[in-house]
Amino acid sequence: MYSIKQVVEMLDIPSVTLRAWENRYQAVTPERTESGYRLYTQDNIEDLRWLKEQTEKQGISISHAVRLLKARKENPAAEGPAGGDGTSREAFAKMRQQIYTALLEFQGERANALIDFGFSMYGYEAMFHQVLVPVLVRVGDAWEEGTATVAQEHYMTHMVSNRFYQFFHLFPVYAHLPKVLAFCPEGEHHQVGLLLFSLFLRKNGVEVVYLGANTPEAGIIAMLETQSRIGAVCMSVTDKELLPYCEELIARLKTVRTDMRFILGGKAYEETGVSVPEAAEVIAGPPGRWQEWFDFSFTALRK
């Protein structure tokens, strides 16, 4: 057992910081002597050392770090997958199930703690592609099958989507690249692919104006009329019955901005034989191919 003075000397954490971490964030819970003095266990020391490393080396807030620590303790078996073996798949599957169950039961704090832990262990790209996207797809399927209520579907989609949005602000924007306007047309409610592609663009320094699902045409036209730096429109469609409308929409948008380029994606555009309007290109295939497209094709849009 260690006194607070010993902990301060061992970890180089000011006593006032230790007390704040304990009182405000419940980072650790030291034992107390009969006189009320704190006594720290070896486990407390290791937890505090880990929290200090997260705040100083990783640059995250103490509140975030404490959530990660609690998730780490709740899910000790989910130590980061090292590769694509069976253990990795099992770890991702376990985390998907835990997050899905927590959200289905409206346990937002637990879900966020698990997601935070996943980001710290696996990185944001693995978490998005291996965990969060499958969770969104699963809840969408559950809603269509009637095994999840509308309230559950809305809540889960909102919670996971918010985690996507948070990363939009972590990457720098390069002024020499044009803005991209990203949306799903009116009638299209599935935006998972659009979220992922928009995040990919942001990672590459592109400023993305993200409008989301079911976007009215009037709002799109207003954006193009007032935002001259928008050089490309990114549109995602899964419902192939919307394709005729999308073709007409693109034609109308081109009358507003004749120089506009269109980036199209989604299951509807990935089917063979689909007509692609002039000045438009379809981005299909796995996300791993997106970088090659960006490096060689997106350069034509640079200003």
Image (cartoon, helix red, strand yellow):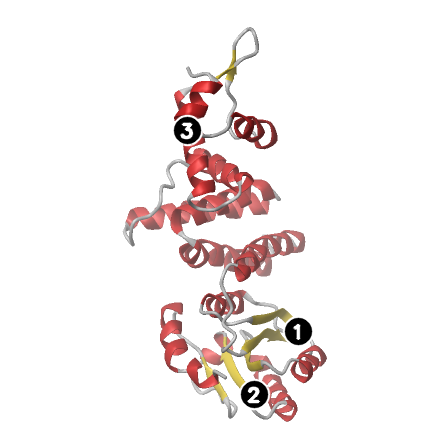
Q: Are marks 3 and 2 in contact (CB under 8 Å)?
A: no
Picture disc at residue 215: 1
Q: Is residue 220 above or below residue 203?
A: below
Tell whether 296 sits left or right of 4. left
Label 2 and label 1: CA atoms lie apart by 18 Å
The answer, for residue 40, to whether it is visible in the render is no
Query: Which residue is denoted by mark 2 in the rendering?
Result: 260
Query: Which residue is denoted by mark 3 in the rendering?
Result: 11
Q: Secondary structure at mark 1?
A: strand
Amino acid, disc 3: Leu
Mark 2 or 1: in front is: 2
Q: Residues within 10 Å of mark 3 (few under 14, many from 20)?
A: few
The answer, for residue 295, to whether it is visible in the render is yes
Instruction: Indicate the position of residue 177 as horizontal and vertical percent values.
Output: 50, 77
Q: Is residue 234 above or below residue 50?
A: below
Of the numbered discs 3 and 2, the one sitting upstream in the chain is 3
Of the numbered discs 2 and 1, the one sitting upstream in the chain is 1
Q: Secondary structure at mark 2?
A: loop
Which residue is located at x 42 percent, y 39 percent?
53
Mark 3 or 2: in front is: 3
- 251, 46: nearer the viewer: 46
